[in-house]
Image (tube, grey):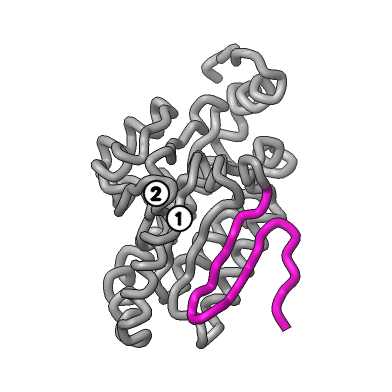
Amino acid sequence: MGHIFRNIIYESLDGVAKIVINRPPLNILNVETISELAQALEDARTDEGVKVVLITGAGDRAFSAGVDIKDHFPEKIDTTLELFHKLFHSMANVHKPTIAVVNGFALGGGCELAAACDIVIASEKAQFGQPEISVAAIPTVATVLLPRLIGRRKALELIFTGDMISAAEAKQIGLVNQVVPPDKLVDTTNELISKLKEKSPVVLKLTKMAICQGLDLEFKKALDGVTGIYLNLLMRTEDAIEGLKAFLEKRKPEWKGK
């Protein structure tokens, strides 16, 4: 019997596991949603009938606008990071093609989730970004993953500025594979899935393992390192708390530099 989810929709049909983040309009990731995503990925991993895994967001406004800001405060951040990183370890353990279908905003944790997929197909109106710096937070997964995907300089620019970029620019820098008109998103995704389903599942699995083996080991070790920086250094600063409070109070933060 399959798991019952409250914040996502999980469907396994005709060789495709479809995972929909179902918290419109922005599909914010609270800790429960993060846990459900990890479980859905584990379900897809262990289901021998699943050949391809697809992740998208409900509605047409957002893939996901990131992790709930309320889950970044000191009393919750340990649990949030533990569950969030578990999600990406679950993603790394899925030795099947994973496709992110980005239909709108992919920001913060949403951008990280899309970037962690093997292939990213985006609508022309999609936007990507890591805005955590604006609330004095560190995008832990992005600090490890983005330099590997788009290079150190571009990763630093995106994370330092917190700016959003268009789908076209995301494709140009290597964050996205394909950019299509919104009304072509489903057809383009289905065409790719059809191609992948024609291939040998075991060869796809072994090919992905071969490509990711060394990278995954480095990724896990690096993620442990950035977790220590976040919990032991960042969360002991006054600016970290000020950034979160300012966001919730809808005001400009007053940085103290300590």
Mark 2 crowd level (few <14, some 14–19, many ≥20, 10 Å Cα): many
Q: Residue placed at 60% from the left, 76% from the top?
A: 43
Which residue position is annotated with label 1? Answer: 101
- Taking the view exactly as shown, the residue that stands out farthest to the front is 183
The relative height of residue 223 versus residue 51 in the rendered view (above or below) is above
The residue under the point 52% across, 25% down is 134
The residue tagged 2 is 122
**Is 163 rendered above or below residue 214?**
above
Q: Which span is picked out in magenta? A: 1-23
**Is residue 79 visible in the rendered structure shown here?**
no
The quarter in which the N terminus is drawn is: bottom right
- Count of labels in the image: 2
Tell me, yes or no, if residue 235 can be seen here.
yes
Residues at badges 1 and 2 in contact (C-beta under 8 Å)? yes
Q: Position of residue 86 (x, y in %)?
A: 57, 61
Mark 1 / mark 2, whichever is N-terminal: 1
Residue 35 lies in quadrant: bottom right
Residue drawn where x is 37% and y is 33% of the image: 165
Residue 7 in percent (x, y) is at 71, 56
Depth check: 61 or 227 in front? 61
Image quadrant assignment for residue 256: top right
Q: Percent x, y for residue 240?
A: 60, 28
Of residues 190 and 94, which is closer to you in this image? Answer: 190
Residue at point 65% right, 14% down?
Answer: 251
How many other residues sit within 10 Å of disc 1, few (<14), some (14-19) or many (≥20)?
many
Could you tell me which secondary element the residue under label 2 belongs to? strand
Is residue 96 found left or right of 179 in the rendered image? right
Question: What type is the residue that disc 1 sits on?
Answer: Val
Quadrant of the frame with the C terminus: top right
Q: Position of residue 176 (x, y in %)?
A: 33, 49
